[in-house]
Image: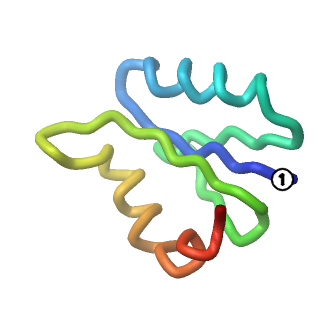
Amino acid sequence: MRTLIAYAGKTGNTAKCARKIAIHLNQVTLVDLNAEVVNPKDFDAVIVASPVYSHKFERSVGSFLKKYQEILQTKP
C-alpha cells in the first residue's frame, strides 16, 4: 500500500513525528507541505500531520485539505 504522510510545521516537531510514523510503514512518501506540492490521488492512504494554532491547522495543511477534500474523503 502506497502511503502519503503530508505534514507541515514551524519548529520541526511535526516533521519528527511524521518520520517516526514513516519508519513503521512500507512504501511511504513524506512531504513537507510548506516546501512541496503533492497530489494525494496517487496514494492508497494519506496521513496528514499539523500543529494547531488558535484552533486552526498550519496554513499549508489547511489549504491541502481544502484543495483535495473530495479525493481525501475516499481514502482510508
Q: Position of residue 31 (x, y in %)?
A: 63, 43
Residue at 47% of width from left, 43% of height from top?
34
Q: Position of residue 51 (x, y in %)?
A: 33, 34
Amino acid on which the number 1 mark rests in the picture: Arg
Kindly identify which residue carries mark 1.
2
Q: Position of residue 7 (x, y in %)?
A: 51, 40
Q: Quadrant of residue 22?
A: top right
Above/below status of 39 relative to 13:
below
The C terminus sits in image quarter: bottom right
- Secondary element under disc 1, as helix, strand or loop, is loop
Above/below status of 42 relative to 52:
below
Q: Residue furthest bottom?
A: 70
Q: Position of residue 3 (x, y in %)?
A: 76, 49
Residue at 60% of width from left, 57% of height from top?
37
Above/below status of 62 relative to 8:
below
Q: Residue furthest front?
A: 76
